[in-house]
Image: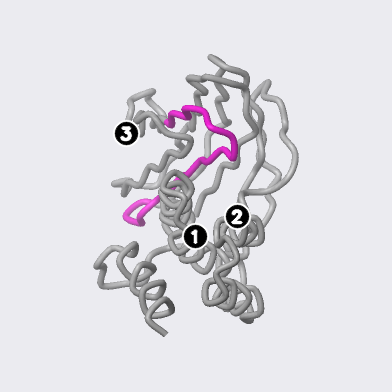
Amino acid sequence: MRRFLLATALTGLTLPALAETPSPVKIAELSARLYAMGTEAGDPLLILSAARMRKGLAPVAGDRAAADGVAGEGAPLGWEEMLARAEALADGDAALLGLIEDARAEGMKGVASGPVYNIGQLGNGKGDTYPPIEFRGGEYAEVYVEAKAATNLNLGIYDDKGRLVCSDTDISHIAYCGWTPATAGSFTLKVDNKGPAAADYALMTN
């Protein structure tokens, strides 16, 4: 019971204290960060919490492609993969394994239609630029990228005049941008792989 309460509390702590429920795109980012923390620390409880968050996403494959980009294969990191990793780290702990099985058996509680994702592939030092995407004025816009492999993805968002409106350039395999356009308009998304290796990545938008 203590382990279950701890896992539940960890999930709650990862969600920002917002008046509204975090968006599916934001939950995707938070679950990826929690999974990365758990993997680095070898902590199956953190990974379990990440898997439970991601299980409700129900991402939808899109048809957006980068200009002259290379299409990747697969899908964003799934909750099944997360649970398998937690199981491997549980090291025979019966209580933990029970929680993992409970999470695996839980019904899908996700949104009817989750974030739209597209899979691309970037070599080390390469970049993808996506054709302009329309976002509504006055509504919060979100773009998120993640790679399964250990690499360094950077994300930049540019308005129709080429001005940078949002970027995430920290050293990480995930990057998130959220902003509120003053008016409706077209925005260009650029994803850069700063290394150290080639990687498939998933790009999600709201």
Say whether residue 142 is magenta. Answer: yes
Mark 1 neighbour density, 10 Å: few (under 14) some (14–19) many (20 or more): many
Q: Furthest-bottom residue in view?
A: 1
Report the side of 45 relative to 10 (left or right): right
User: Which structural element holds mark 3?
Assistant: strand
Report the side of 2 relative to 203 (left or right): left
The mark closer to the camera, 3 or 2, is: 2
The first of marks 3 and 2 along the sequence is 2
Mark 1 lies on residue: 44
Segment tinted magenta in the rendering: 137-155
Coordinates of residue 128 in the picture (x, y in percent): 57, 24
- The amino acid type, in three-letter code, at marker 2 is Arg
Identify the residue at horizontal 66%, vertical 39% (top origin): 119
User: Which structural element holds mark 2?
Assistant: helix
Identify the residue at horizontal 28%, vertical 63% (top origin): 16
Mark 3 lies on residue: 165
Mark 2 lies on residue: 85
User: Which structural element holds mark 1?
Assistant: helix
- The amino acid type, in three-letter code, at marker 1 is Pro
